Image: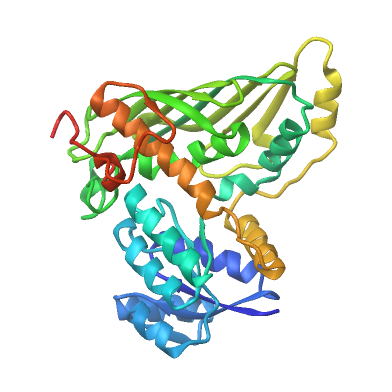
Amino acid sequence: MLRKAAVVGTGAIAVAHARAIRAHGDRLDLAAVVDIDGGRAADFAATWGAPRVYADVGALLAAGGVDLVHLCTPPAWHAPLAAQCLEAGVDVLVEKPPTLSLAELDALIEVSGRTGAHLATVFQHRFGSGAVRLQAMAAAGELGAPMLATCETQWYRDDDYYNVAWRGRWDTEGGGPTMGHGIHQLDLLLSVLGPWEQVTAVAARRARHVETEDVSMALVTFAGGATAAVVNSVLSPRQESRLRFDYAHATVELRHLYGYTDDDWTITPAPGHDDVAERWRRERSTVESGHAGQLAAVLDALDAGVAPPVTAADTRRTMELIAALYASAFTGAPVHSGQISPGDPFAKRMNGTGAPWE
């Protein structure tokens, strides 16, 4: 089945979506482009071969003929535009962060459940070959019990980066590096270790002239028994994204920046468990993690008539951890899974009762 896609928002990340659509040209066709900047939309459509251009999502939906919307706008527009598409019965693949708050996400989950249209979030690092292999080996018990993990997103964004009007603000970006940058690594961490139980965190604004934090740190415990240390930063001149998982039988580690291949993974077996490393090395791939890998999984799910990954339930678990991290950092108390109720200030906005520096 050849589905029709639309890209809404033509900023830098939209290019990754257009490339992914082109990579699956036998299954998905870029039928339309939407952007409030007509000239930019027209240029994008010409570059990627989209026959239709619209100034708003309403016009796109009224014209019909679109099965999957790739939502690539700034974060504040994700929830209202996704809701508009879901109400029209159109599936949505939304960039991170999917919404500005848990409340917004829960509202989209309600619309999706009522209309039957699917909502999936772009967390492409789940779909690289190394992550898939790790998830499979962990689920099969080949690595032994999970013990300890570290999850680090240490990037560098200078003051010029925050000259874009919507960046660094709670009401338009939803948070700082915890929400806008580290969310990818946090989601991959959760996809491997499963449900989290408790988080204890700190967050600070050390250097950037923004409303949000520019660094955060957290300790997270998991239902499976593991403990993880998490770091998110936009103040780190030597940039790196790093995940390390210490299991009873091996340490598995990933070091990269914005995407990875198998060359970015290492495995160190515990004494007497060389077979684990041999099993890891049997499956090699040169494919880089990216949007095309996730889009393949999305299309497979739609063909099968099931919810595409990353599902709304998976997304909510990641977003709840982020909300809990902020709640712990700003209240000074540990936060448990399920503790943030719908009426909680940290469900309505990530800064909840307010950051200490506000």
Compared to residue 203, the image places residue 78 above or below, namely below
Residue 14 placement, left or right of 35: right
Compared to residue 245, the image places residue 342 above or below, namely below
- Screen quadrant of the N terminus: bottom right
Let me know if residue 338 appears in the view. Answer: yes
Compared to residue 6, the image places residue 265 above or below, namely above
Compared to residue 86, the image places residue 39 above or below, namely below
Residue 62 or residue 71, whichever sits in front = 62
Residue occupying the far bottom of the picture: 63
Residue 184 placement, left or right of 38: right
Residue 110 or residue 142, whichever sits in front = 110
Let me know if residue 203 appears in the view. Answer: no
Residue located 29% across and 76% down the image: 37
Residue occupying the far top of the picture: 271
Please state the horizontal and vertical placement of residue 342, each as a whole percent of the image: 32, 46
Q: How many marks?
A: 0
**Location of residue 106 (image quadrant):** bottom left
- Screen quadrant of the C terminus: top left
Residue 201 or residue 114, whichever sits in front = 114
Please state the horizontal and vertical placement of residue 239, each as a whole percent of the image: 44, 33
Residue 55 placement, left or right of 72: left
**Location of residue 299 (image quadrant):** bottom right
Please state the horizontal and vertical placement of residue 33, each as a whole percent of the image: 44, 78
Residue located 65% across and 56% down the image: 293
